């Protein structure tokens, strides 16, 4: 069974600084996908970034990058130049292989509440 | 945005009453999911569907049933609501041929 662990229930960062949100995962599959979602106070789930387990380069999307360390089973989210609008809950998630005949659902961590300070 | 709507968006109901939540999508995605979100747990899978009339249980399915009679609609039913089912419910869809899972706006359900 897959498991996602986010050990930081809350984080604070100064505006314009970079912040790293930790995510470790556990799976016996060789092929999998890793995701980060943002959930602002309004409640919607916003997709941020995706990393495939066979992708050799770390994924980047604007100010978001995913620090993927496969051997350590970690997939940390790095937000550069934090903005006040980045204050939100952030979820790490994993999908099992599409070829497995499974539900293809996402398994989520418990989330990290990020607060950006002015 | 996969054109996912959920109804109702907010509902307050009493213990023991039946409740049905609706998820509607416009993108013809094959897979549909119901998750619940509770503090400290992230999102957990309740039920999912991999086609019309094809459904299966997820991690926290007790007390819930689902139906999918059309590709675009996925219904979640609480046969007899309990206070432990107070939660935010998210519907999601997945086309199956790329990686992104799309989420609806959520339904906040309170069982008193």
Image (cartoon, coloured by chain):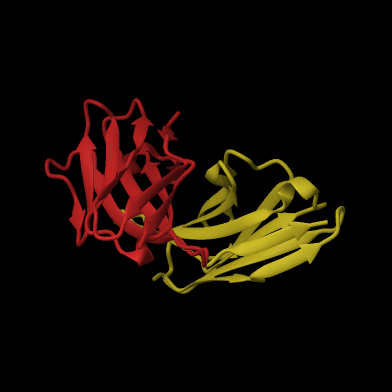
Chain colours: A red, B yellow
Q: Residue furthest left?
A: A56
On the image, the x and y values in percent for residue A25 come to: 36, 32
Query: How far across and how far down the image is residue A101, in percent?
Result: 40, 40
Residue B54 against residue A118 in the figure, above or below: above
- Residue A87: quadrant of the picture: bottom left
Quarter of the image where one finds residue A38 = bottom left
Q: Nearer the viewer, residue A1 or A41?
A: A41
Residue A11's spot in the image, x, y percent? 40, 46
Choose top left, top right, bottom left or bottom right for residue A4: top left
Could you say which is closer to the camera, residue B16 or residue A44? A44
Q: Which residue: 56% across, 58% down?
A: B90
Is residue B85 something that shows in the picture? yes
Relative horizontal placement of residue A60, taking residue B54 as reference (left or right): left
Total numbered circles: 0
Q: Is residue B34 left or right of residue B3?
A: right
Residue B23, how many percent across, how many down?
A: 58, 66
A6 shown above or below A105: above
Q: Is residue A81 left or right of residue A108?
A: left
Image quarter hosting the N terminus of chain B: bottom left
Q: In what quadrant of the picture does the C terminus of chain B appear?
A: bottom right
- The residue that appears at 49% across and 41% down in the rendered structure is A110
Residue at 79 percent across and 49 percent down: it is B83
Image position of B25 (left or right of B97): right
Asked if residue B30 shows in the view, the reply is: no
């Amino acid at each position: 069974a897959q498991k996602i662990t986010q050990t930081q229930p809350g984080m604070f960062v100064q505006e314009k600084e970079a912040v790293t949100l930790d995510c470790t995962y556990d799976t016996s599959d060789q092929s999998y996908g890793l995701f980060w979602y943002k959930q602002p106070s309004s409640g919607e789930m916003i997709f941020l970034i995706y990393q495939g387990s066979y992708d050799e380069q770390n994924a980047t999307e604007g100010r978001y990058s995913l620090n993927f360390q496969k051997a350590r089973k970690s997939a940390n989210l790095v937000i550069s130049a934090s903005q006040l609008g980045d204050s939100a809950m952030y979820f790490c998630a994993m999908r099992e292989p599409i070829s497995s005949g499974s539900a293809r659902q996402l398994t989520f961590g418990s989330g990290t509440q990020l607060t950006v300070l002015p | 945005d996969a054109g996912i709507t959920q109804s109702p968006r907010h509902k307050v109901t009493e213990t023991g009453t039946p409740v049905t939540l609706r998820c509607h999508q416009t993108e013809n995605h094959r897979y549909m999911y119901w998750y619940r979100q509770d503090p400290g747990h992230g999102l957990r899978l309740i039920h999912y569907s991999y086609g019309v009339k094809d459904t299966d249980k997820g991690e926290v399915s007790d007390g819930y049933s689902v139906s999918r009679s059309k590709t675009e609609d996925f219904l979640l039913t609480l046969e007899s609501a309990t206070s432990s089912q107070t939660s935010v419910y998210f519907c999601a869809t997945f086309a199956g041929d790329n990686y992104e899972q799309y989420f609806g706006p959520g339904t906040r359900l309170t069982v008193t």
